[in-house]
C-alpha cells in the first residue's frame, strides 16, 4: 500500500530541495550569484574581447550550449539527485552528532585554557567570529582539494567523479552534475571538517563562537560565489593573470581541469584557493585565449542518459574488480603451474 | 409531563457530559455514596496548598536569617495562627488568605518528608533527617549562606523540600501504591464523613502537590509563570472566579508547576499542560465511575495517566539539574578568570554557591522519586560531590559529629568539566528537551548556520 500522505510529504520536500538550490545563499547556483556571474561575464566579453553587449548576451545564452545533450543531462541529474539525496540523507554523517561527540571527548581529555575564554578580558567575540569563519573557509577549501584529488587518483572514486567530467558543455548547473555516491562523500567531508572545527572552537571559546554570514552562507564563500564562481563551469575563460592565479583558482583554470586534452588532466583541483594545487604540484595557469574541448575521451551520446549516468560507475567498478580477480587468479594459476 | 422528564434527562446528560470533559480542576460532583454533609463538590487539595505556603515561608525565613525555632514552626510545627510569610499580597496582586490555617489547619512539612536514604549527601541520612540538619545548620549562618562549606541553605532546603515532600508524596505514594485496587478504593469515602471517595482524594492530593492553579489548562505557561512571580500582569489571569483576590488554594502557582511554566514558556516543552491534562483526565475518569469501585480497565487507564505525570515530573526535575549545571559552569568560568587576575571573587563566589545549591537541591530531589536511578544516580552524585569545589580546591567529603568535613579535591577547571558531564547525563538518562543554559548550545547554533550538504555540489 502506498501511503499517499508520505508521497505528498516526500514530493513537497523534494520540490523544496530543488527550489532551495536557487533561493539559498549557501548554494552555488543561488540566483544572486547567477546574476552576478552574468554581469561579470558580460563585462569581460565586452571589455576584454571587444564584443558588443548584444553579441555578448547572445554568446552567453547560446542555446546550443544550454540545451545540448550534456546540459540537458545536467538538469535531469540535478532534479533526480535532490530526491536521491533526500533518501540518502540518513546516511550522511550528522555534523551535530560528530561535533557533540568531539566536544565531549575534548573536555574529557583536556582542560580548556583560561586564555581562550572571552567572557572576561579574553579575545573579543568579533575576533573569534572572524578567526572561526576564516579557519572554516580555509580548512574547508583544503579538504575539498584533497577529496577532489583523491577522486581523480583512486580508480573506484574516479568511476563516480567521471560523471561530472563527461559534461561536454559547461553551464553553472554543471556543478550539480554529480553522482549521488559522490554526493555522500561530499556530505561526509563537510560533516568531518565542519563538525571537527565547530567542536574545537566551542571547546576553546565556549558559547562565544559565531559564523559571519552573508545571505546565510559563510561570508568568504558568499564573496567568492558572488565574484563569479559560477563561471568555473562556463565557456567564458576569465583568467586572473599569472600572479593572482598562484593564489586563487580562476574560472579559466577550472575549465582547464575539465579539458579533454591529456596534458590538462589531473590539474587545478582547487575550489577557491590555489595554494593547495601549488603544494601538490598540480597548479596550471590559464590563458584568456585558451580554446578547450570539455569532457573525457570517448564520450558517446549514451553517456548523457540518466540511466547511464547513475549505473555506469557501478558497472565500471564491478568490471574493474572482476578484472583484478581474473588477473590474480591467472597469476596464481601460472605460479602453481611453474 | 413526558416532555418535562425528557428535558430534565437531556439537561442532566449535557451537564454530566460537560463534567466528564472538565478542563478546570474544580467543581467535581460528589459521588461518594451516602454523603450527608453540606459540601457541593468533591475535590479537595487545600492541605497540599497549605504545605506550599509553608515551603515558601520556610524559604523566606531561611534567607532572612530567622532562628531555628522560627523556621521549625513552619517546617515541623503544626501550631495554630501561623501567618503566611510567602506568598503575601503585593501591589497589584492581592491574595485571599493571610494565615496557614485558612487553607488547612495542623499541617507541616516534616511529617511528609521522604523517609528513604539520600545518598547524595554524607551521613546516611533520610530525606527528612537531611532537611532537619540543613535547617539547623542554616540557623547558624548569615541569611542561610555558609561560605566555608559552599552551602546556600535557602536554595538547598527549598529545592530539596520540593523533591522530598511534594514530588515524593505525589509520585512515590499517591500516584504509586495508593492507586492499588484495595488501597483507598473508590466505592468508599476517603475517611468517615468525607465528601470524596478514596481514589478521588488520592488523585487530588497528588494534583495539589504539583502546585498548579486549578484553571491551568485555560492559561499559557507564561501566565502561570507570572502568577507564581506575583506579577501584577498575572493577577487577572490568576483570579479565575473574579472576586478581586487570588485564592492560595486553587488560583496560585507554586513549586514544580512554576518550574514547568518556566521551561515551557521557552516553547520547546509542554510539561505544565501535559501534567495538568493528565491530572484532569484522571480526575474525570474517577468522577465518571460515580462512586463505584474502579474496574481493572479504568484503573489501568488511571495508572497510565499517573505514569505520564511521573515521567514528565521526573524529566522536569532533570531539566532543572541540566539548567543549573549550565549556570554553575558559567559561574566557574567567571570565577576562574577573576582568581587568575587576582580580582575580587566575592560576588562571583556567591553566585556560584547559589546556583550550586539549586543544582544540588534538584539533584537530591531526583533521589526522592521512589525510582532506583541506578548508575545515573551514582554518576550524578560523583560528578556533583557533597559540596561545590571550594576556592582552595577542597570539597565536603563527610559528616562527622554533625559537622561537614572537607578534603582536597579537584580544581575548579576540572569541576567545570563535571558540569558538562552532568548536562550530558541528564540528556542521556532523562531526554531533557528544554535544555536551558546548554553548554553545547553553540554547537547546535553553528551547525544550523552552516546548513546541510544535500545539494551534492561538485568542485
Image (tube, coloured by chain):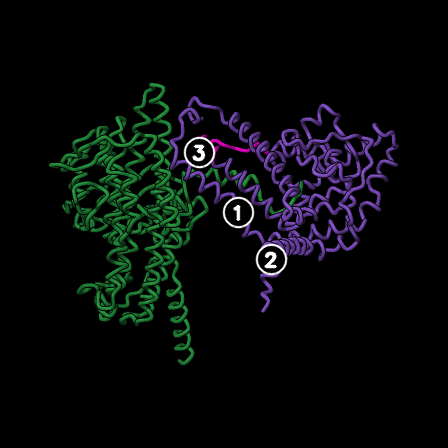
Chain colours: A purple, B green
Disc 2: which chain? A
Against B75, residue B143 (above or below) is above
To the question of a shared chain for discs 1 and 2, the answer is yes
Q: Name the quadrant containing residue B29.
A: bottom left
Boundaries of the magenta span: A200-213
Alpha carbon separation for disc pair 3 and 1:
21 Å
Q: Mark 1: few, some, or many residues within 10 Å (few <14, many ≥20)?
A: some
Q: Residue at x 66, y 31 (%)?
A: A281
Q: Which residue is mark 2?
A: A337
Q: Residue at x 28, y 68 (%)?
A: B31
Disc 1: which chain? A
The spot of residue B378 in percent (x, y) is 27, 46
Let me know if residue B289 appears in the view. Answer: yes
Q: Which residue is mark 3?
A: A203
Q: Is residue A202 magenta?
A: yes
Q: Which secondary structure, mark 1?
A: loop
The spot of residue B227 in percent (x, y) is 36, 44
Q: Which mark is residue A93?
A: 1
Amino acid at each position: 500500500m502506498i501511503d499517499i500522505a508520505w508521497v505528498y510529504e516526500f514530493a513537497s520536500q523534494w520540490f523544496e530541495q530543488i527550489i532551495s538550490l536557487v533561493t539559498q545563499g549557501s548554494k552555488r547556483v543561488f540566483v544572486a550569484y547567477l546574476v552576478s556571474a552574468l554581469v561579470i561575464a558580460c563585462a569581460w566579453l565586452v571589455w576584454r574581447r571587444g564584443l558588443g553587449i548584444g553579441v555578448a548576451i547572445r554568446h552567453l545564452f547560446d542555446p546550443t550550449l544550454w540545451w545540448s545533450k550534456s546540459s540537458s543531462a545536467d538538469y535531469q541529474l540535478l532534479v533526480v539527485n535532490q530526491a536521491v539525496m533526500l533518501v540518502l540523507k540518513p546516511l550522511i554523517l550528522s555534523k551535530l552528532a560528530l561535533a557533540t561527540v568531539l566536544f565531549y571527548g575534548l573536555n574529557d581529555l583536556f582542560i580548556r585554557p583560561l586564555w581562550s575564554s572571552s567572557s572576561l578580558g579574553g579575545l573579543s567575540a568579533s575576533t573569534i567570529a572572524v578567526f572561526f569563519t576564516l579557519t572554516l573557509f580555509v580548512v574547508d577549501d583544503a579538504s575539498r582539494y584533497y577529496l577532489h584529488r583523491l577522486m581523480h587518483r583512486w580508480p573506484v572514486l574516479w568511476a563516480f567523479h567521471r560523471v561530472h567530467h563527461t559534461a561536454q558543455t559547461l553551464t553553472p548547473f554543471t556543478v550539480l552534475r554529480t553522482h549521488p555516491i559522490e554526493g555522500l562523500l561530499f556530505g561526509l567531508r563537510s560533516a568531518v571538517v565542519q563538525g571537527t572545527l565547530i567542536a574545537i572552537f566551542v571547546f576553546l571559546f565556549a558559547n562565544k563562537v559565531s559564523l559571519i554570514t552573508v545571505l546565510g552562507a559563510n561570508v568568504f564563500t558568499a564573496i567568492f560565489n558572488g565574484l563569479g564562481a559560477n563561471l568555473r563551469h562556463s565557456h567564458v575563460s576569465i583568467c586572473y593573470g599569472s600572479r593572482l592565479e598562484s593564489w586563487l583558482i580562476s574560472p579559466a583554470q577550472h575549465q582547464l581541469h575539465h579539458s579533454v586534452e591529456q596534458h590538462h588532466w589531473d590539474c587545478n583541483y582547487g575550489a577557491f584557493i590555489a595554494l593547495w594545487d601549488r603544494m601538490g604540484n598540480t597548479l596550471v595557469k590559464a590563458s584568456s585565449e585558451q580554446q578547450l574541448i570539455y569532457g573525457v575521451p570517448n564520450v558517446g551520446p549514451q553517456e548523457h542518459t540518466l540511466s547511464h549516468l547513475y549505473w555506469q560507475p557501478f558497472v565500471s567498478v564491478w568490471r574493474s574488480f572482476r578484472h583484478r580477480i581474473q588477473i590474480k587468479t591467472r597469476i596464481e594459476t601460472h605460479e602453481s603451474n611453474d | 409531563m413526558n416532555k418535562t422528564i425528557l428535558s430534565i434527562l437531556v439537561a442532566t446528560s449535557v451537564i454530566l457530559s460537560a463534567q466528564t470533559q472538565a478542563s478546570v480542576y474544580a467543581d467535581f460532583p460528589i459521588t461518594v455514596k451516602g454523603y450527608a454533609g453540606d459540601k457541593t463538590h468533591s475535590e479537595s487539595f487545600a492541605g497540599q496548598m497549605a504545605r506550599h505556603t509553608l515551603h515558601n515561608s520556610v524559604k523566606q525565613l531561611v534567607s532572612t536569617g530567622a532562628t531555628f525555632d522560627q523556621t521549625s514552626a513552619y517546617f515541623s510545627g503544626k501550631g495554630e495562627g501561623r501567618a503566611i510569610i510567602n506568598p503575601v499580597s503585593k501591589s497589584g496582586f492581592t491574595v485571599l488568605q493571610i494565615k496557614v490555617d485558612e487553607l488547612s489547619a495542623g499541617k507541616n512539612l516534616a511529617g511528609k518528608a521522604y523517609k528513604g536514604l539520600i545518598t547524595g549527601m554524607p551521613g546516611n541520612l533520610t530525606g527528612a533527617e537531611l532537611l532537619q540538619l540543613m535547617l539547623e545548620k542554616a540557623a547558624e549562618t548569615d541569611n542561610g549562606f555558609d561560605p566555608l562549606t559552599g552551602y546556600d541553605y535557602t536554595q538547598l532546603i527549598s529545592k530539596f523540600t520540593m523533591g522530598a515532600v511534594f514530588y515524593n508524596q505525589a509520585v512515590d505514594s499517591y500516584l504509586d501504591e495508593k492507586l492499588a485496587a484495595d488501597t483507598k478504593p473508590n466505592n468508599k469515602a476517603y475517611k468517615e464523613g468525607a465528601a470524596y471517595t478514596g481514589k478521588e482524594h488520592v488523585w487530588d492530593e497528588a494534583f495539589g502537590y504539583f502546585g498548579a492553579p486549578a484553571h491551568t489548562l485555560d492559561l499559557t505557561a507564561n501566565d502561570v509563570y507570572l502568577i507564581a512571580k506575583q506579577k501584577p500582569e498575572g493577577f487577572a489571569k490568576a483570579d479565575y472566579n473574579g472576586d478581586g483576590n487570588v485564592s492560595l488554594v486553587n488560583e496560585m502557582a507554586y513549586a514544580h508547576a512554576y518550574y514547568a511554566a518556566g521551561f515551557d514558556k521557552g516553547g520547546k516543552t509542554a510539561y505544565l499542560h501535559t501534567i495538568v491534562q493528565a491530572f484532569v483526565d484522571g480526575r474525570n475518569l474517577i468522577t465518571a465511575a460515580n462512586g463505584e469501585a474502579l474496574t481493572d480497565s479504568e484503573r489501568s487507564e488511571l495508572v497510565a495517566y499517573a505514569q505520564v505525570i511521573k515521567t514528565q515530573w521526573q524529566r522536569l526535575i532533570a531539566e532543572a539539574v541540566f539548567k543549573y549545571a549550565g549556570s554553575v559552569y558559567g559561574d566557574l568560568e567567571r570565577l576562574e578568570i577573576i582568581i587568575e587576575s587576582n580580582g575580587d571573587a566575592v560576588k562571583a563566589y556567591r553566585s556560584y554557591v547559589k546556583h550550586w545549591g539549586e543544582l544540588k537541591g534538584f539533584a537530591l530531589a531526583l533521589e526522592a522519586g521512589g525510582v532506583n536511578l541506578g548508575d545515573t544516580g551514582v554518576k550524578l552524585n560523583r560528578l556533583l560531590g557533597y559540596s561545590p569545589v571550594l576556592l582552595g580546591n577542597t570539597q565536603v567529603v563527610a559528616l562527622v559529629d554533625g559537622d561537614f568535613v572537607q578534603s582536597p579535591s579537584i580544581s575548579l577547571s576540572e569541576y567545570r568539566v563535571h558540569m558538562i558531564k552532568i548536562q550530558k547525563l541528564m540528556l542521556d538518562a532523562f531526554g531533557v528537551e528544554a535544555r536551558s543554559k546548554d553548554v553545547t548550545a553553540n554547537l547546535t547554533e553553528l551547525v544550523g548556520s552552516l546548513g546541510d550538504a544535500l545539494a551534492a555540489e561538485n568542485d
